Image (tube, coloured by chain):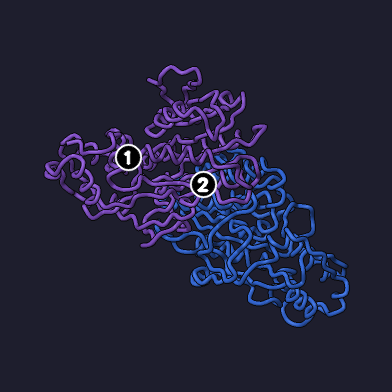
Chain colours: A blue, B purple
Amino acid sequence: MRVLITGANGFVGRQLVLRLLEKGAIASRLISHLLLLDAQLDGFAEDPRLRLHKGSITDAALIRRVLADGIDVVFHLVSVPGGAAEQDYGLGYQVNLLASLELFDQLRQQARPPVLVYASSIAVYGAGLPARMDESAPTCPQLSYGAHKLMVETALCDLARRGEVDGRALRLPGIVARQPQANGLRSAFMSDLLHAYAAGQSYVCPVAPEATAWWMSALCCVNNLIHAAELPALQASTERVWQLPVLRLSMAQVLDALANRFGDAGRAAISFEPDAHLQSLFGAMPLLKASRAQAAGFCHDGNANTLIRNALKLPAGRKAL
Amino acid sequence: MRVLITGANGFVGRQLVLRLLEKGAIASRLISHLLLLDAQLDGFAEDPRLRLHKGSITDAALIRRVLADGIDVVFHLVSVPGGAAEQDYGLGYQVNLLASLELFDQLRQQARPPVLVYASSIAVYGAGLPARMDESAPTCPQLSYGAHKLMVETALCDLARRGEVDGRALRLPGIVARQPQANGLRSAFMSDLLHAYAAGQSYVCPVAPEATAWWMSALCCVNNLIHAAELPALQASTERVWQLPVLRLSMAQVLDALANRFGDAGRAAISFEPDAHLQSLFGAMPLLKASRAQAAGFCHDGNANTLIRNALKLPAGRKAL
């Protein structure tokens, strides 16, 4: 089968590539071709299944060439992150919205409806979530990034209803632990804290210790993306948007797990200077009941200790002291 | 002030043009230019304020020319109707979705944020509405038309949140009484029944007498559109999508009102051959509580008798027997 990953060079994308090459199949069907699309595609291991398509998702002709020999499964991951898309509206509009619509429009014209796994985001909800939240919570994006994700979800559901793609959209929380970089991702502090503590570096956390966030490791995220692709063919009328289960942890709970793994000494290097706006966006996340997603087989990392281990790719078992 | 109407040649558009010329102002600001955009623009009365722009909303260069001298208020009405857009997906995608996004993107680049009144639709809800419905009902479009309306609402809210347009979206029910024509509008039966009864013609109604629909006359709709434009400048954080109040009437109640106006004799010419799919889309509408819209000054026609009078443009008062 032929599989495409957009945004293959991204933080989640690169780990998805590795995992799919290692796994070799999706739902027992061998992967013959793994097509990677991204603006940069460096440092991927040699593998006869890989096809590197370097270029912009906004290049409709490139998409047409990539899809020319047919496609069975698409993981559509590429995004301009939330903070960057808010600053440069035009860029987010072109990449996150218009390019996604163009990709979907080309996919719907395939001979057989491809499986389309879309990385949506909890940014669709906006601020002011209900204190006890479930999968039916209303959406009210507070960033253009979230508005565009929501619009693309709607497009995916519509094409799926028409039987033209077999779409599955997952609302992802902030995924950890990204390498520190100025990439315009507003939730980057979640990754930065983990790396800093693990490295014994000092870190000024921009949300308070009691701020609660939704957590998921890249490992767990990749497993969920692959699980989404492996779900049996969905009927046209099926609900196709899942809020992934998440670990809802306060910064204090995450610090406890970090101390558990790396020792208490690191605590002294962590200080707090809460930014009210950032905290309202990422530090006031309520309890989440995601029964429907769990019933469909989607998972979170389990607990704070396994989150830290998965996120930092640490060996299982004893403390790394 | 400069005012633009897209879809100005449509059923609602033409009545909006007449009403605005007659009224002469929006929120006490005189209308100096009324720009009309549509594929056809025939039979408008001579008026020095009118500027006719004949062409397609999908022509981005035309939009640019239309907006070149600035714009204060836009009524964005143009749509490929639901049935037609479902049949010809590509056309609906280009007109209802992409052209709307392009228009909004050009509007957000205006020097001053224009007031943008968008004619959305109850098609955003889909079938299976709650038995007692209010303005917070979840959306689940069952037609591409409704999906695209929902996506454009989301775009409008996002640009309004950014302060780039002062958007106001109204979810319209089926508007009566259109002239009979094969225009791909699935709710056309609502208008057809009224015209047939008024003309003493026989009519086979495709939903049952007990089927309940949401009703609004074009007169009432135009008043609501103008009211939306006249609301004072909204803060960026304000909710900008209103489900208009509607008259929820069974076909039997509408028949009673028709009999009340035109006499009982016409009843014999009306028969029923319900189409299950059509009835699930337009004939199973629940009670609707639209408190927020009513508090903002939006209205329905009042009662079945005034609906008939408004819809058929009859003089007030005694029966037309």
Give the camera-side residue of B23 and B115: B23
Kindly identify which numbered label has been placed on residue B151: 2
Does residue B70 appear anywhere in the picture? Answer: yes
Q: In front of the other: label 1 or label 2?
A: 1
- Give the farthest residue toward the bottom: A318
Is A196 placed above or below A162 here? below
User: Does dot 2 land on a helix, a strand or a loop?
Assistant: helix
Residue under label 1, please give it. B176
Residue A235, x across and y down, in percent: 40, 59
Residue A52, x across and y down, in percent: 65, 47
Residue at x-position 48% and y-position 37%: B226
Residue B311 appears left or right of A18: left
Residue A3, x across and y down, in percent: 56, 53
Residue B157, x across and y down, in percent: 57, 47
Residue at x-position 46% and y-position 36%: B77
Amino acid type at image mark 2: Met
